[in-house]
Amino acid sequence: MWPNLAVQLITYNRPDEIRRVLEGLRTYLRYEGQVIWCLCDDGSPQGYVQSILADYPDRPWLVSRTKRKGWGGNVNAGLRRLAEEGFNYTFFIEDDYVPLGPLEITWGVALMESKPEIGLVRYDGLAGHYLDLELREARTAEFGMLAYLRISKGTPYFSTYSNRPHLKHRRFHGFYGQYPQGLALAATETLFAGTVTDRADGPWLVVLEDGIPRKFDHIGKSWQGSASDMEVVR
């Protein structure tokens, strides 16, 4: 039996974009086990969360809310909620990444079940990130041999980890810790990526064999560097 999967959807006031993301996930996300949807909202205008839940009543929802604590505070609150609910596997995605093709989440879970050294599988497409990759394979009970690429921490860049869409086991944050809070979005990602890259040990970050080409359309107006991004760190 496949373990339950939580889709952690990070959002702040993107009513049109998030619906495009949800429709894309309806089309392309493939997982053979139970999927629970966790909406993590950081103080969007009144009615925002309720309207999303009303538009997708067929999906089992969990909700976490923060009051303008910024990206790190919002994501950490969702991770705590999922830990309380007992989820080991989380597919992480923000509200402006629209899938462009199949997301074989079952393969990623099978890989991590067979290789407990792995903590995170990137699904975003590595093109554009400078990385050193090691080609490996693992035998899974369900799919036989799966080829994957281990992301080497020997790279001089901090792109080992990315906030782009990824699948992770709770052991990942159990080792590397939660995201920093009280910082603007770019600084939050850079600091956490540096924490991951600087640790020579710890759960591996990998990508499946089809994970190099771009898998998502990054849409919508970015909050990065805007007044909404900066107001939470004053």
Image (spheres, rainbow, N blue to C red):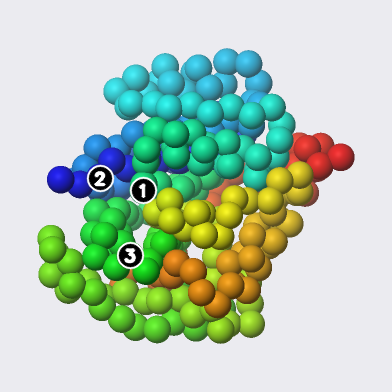
Sequence-wise, which precedes: disc 1 or disc 2? Answer: 2
Report helix, strand or loop for mark 1: strand
| Residue occupying image coordinates x 24% and y 37% | 34
Left or right side of 232 for 191:
left
Which residue is at a point 44% across and 39% down the rendered structure image?
83
Residue 102 visible in rendering: no
- For label 2, the SS is loop
What amino acid is labelled 1 in the image?
A: Tyr
Whole-number angstrom distance, CA of label 1 to CA of label 2: 8 Å
What residue lies at 71% left-to-right and 35% top-to-bottom?
69
Nearest to the observer: residue 210 or residue 194: 194
**Left/right of residue 61 with respect to residue 18 in the rendered view:** left
Residue ID for mark 1: 89
Quadrant of image for the C terminus? top right
Q: Nearer the viewer, residue 148 or 48?
A: 148
Residue 20 picture quarter: top left
Whether the residues at callouts 1 and 2 have beta carbons within 8 Å, the answer is yes
Cα–Cα gap, marks 3 and 2: 15 Å
Q: Is residue 201 visible?
A: yes
Q: Above or below — where is 159 with respect to 217?
A: below
Q: Which residue is mark 3?
A: 116
Q: Nearer the viewer, mark 3 or mark 1?
A: 3
> Residue at image x 33%, y 69%?
208
Q: Which residue is mark 2?
A: 3
- Rendering coords of residue 106 (x, y %): 24, 54
Q: Earlier in the sequence, mark 3 or mark 2?
A: 2
10 Å neighbourhood of mark 1: few (<14), some, or many (≥20)? many
Give the residue type that dot 3 points to.
Pro
Residue 45 picture location, percent across and down? 65, 21
Tell me which numbered mark, 3 or 1, is placed earlier along the sequence: 1
**In the rendered structure, which amino acid carries the disc numbered 2?**
Pro
